[in-house]
Image (cartoon, rainbow, N blue to C red):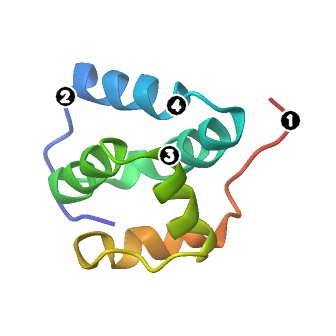
Amino acid sequence: MSDNSEPLEPARLARAKFRSWHRGTREADYMIGGFFDRYHESWGEAEMAWFEDLLAEDDVDVMAWALKSQPTPPRFQGPLIELMQRLDYVDMSR
């Protein structure tokens, strides 16, 4: 996604991974954690900042935006939420 050549800090990635897989409900874990696992390796600073902002939102809202049952706020609109809305990254074998 990003052409940022500087790798993200390992501690920052670990924190985001933990936060994405420990949301409070299994459904949110699969949706948000699965999204992180599938796409984070291609992220630069801008994508990571977007994701960290998303992690601060309520799971119910994030899931509604991903399922398109509520409009996505302008600050989250763009290519990353569009990837999330595909839901082709959810691995239910965990």
> In the figure, 13 relative to 69: above or below?
above
Left or right, 87 with respect to 32, comes to: right
Residue ID at (53%, 51%)? 60
Judged from this view, the residue extending furthest toward the right is: 93
> In the figure, 2 relative to 22: above or below?
below
Viewer-side residue, 16 vs 57: 57
Amino acid tagged 1:
Ser
Viewer-side residue, 75 vs 60: 60
Query: How many angstroms separate mark 2 from mark 4 (CA)?
Result: 22 Å
Mark 4 = which residue?
A: 23
Point out the frontmost of discs 3 and 1: 3
Label annotation for residue 93: 1
Q: Please tell me which of labels 2 and 3 falls first in the chain.
A: 2
The picture quadrant where one finds residue 4 is bottom left
Point out the frontmost of discs 2 and 4: 4
Mark 3 = which residue?
A: 59
Viewer-side residue, 3 vs 63: 63
Label annotation for residue 9: 2
Mark 4 touches mark 1? (CB < 8 Å): no
Check disc 2: other Cα within 10 Å, few if <14, some if 14-19, many if 20+: few
Query: How many angstroms separate mark 1 from mark 2 (CA)?
Result: 29 Å
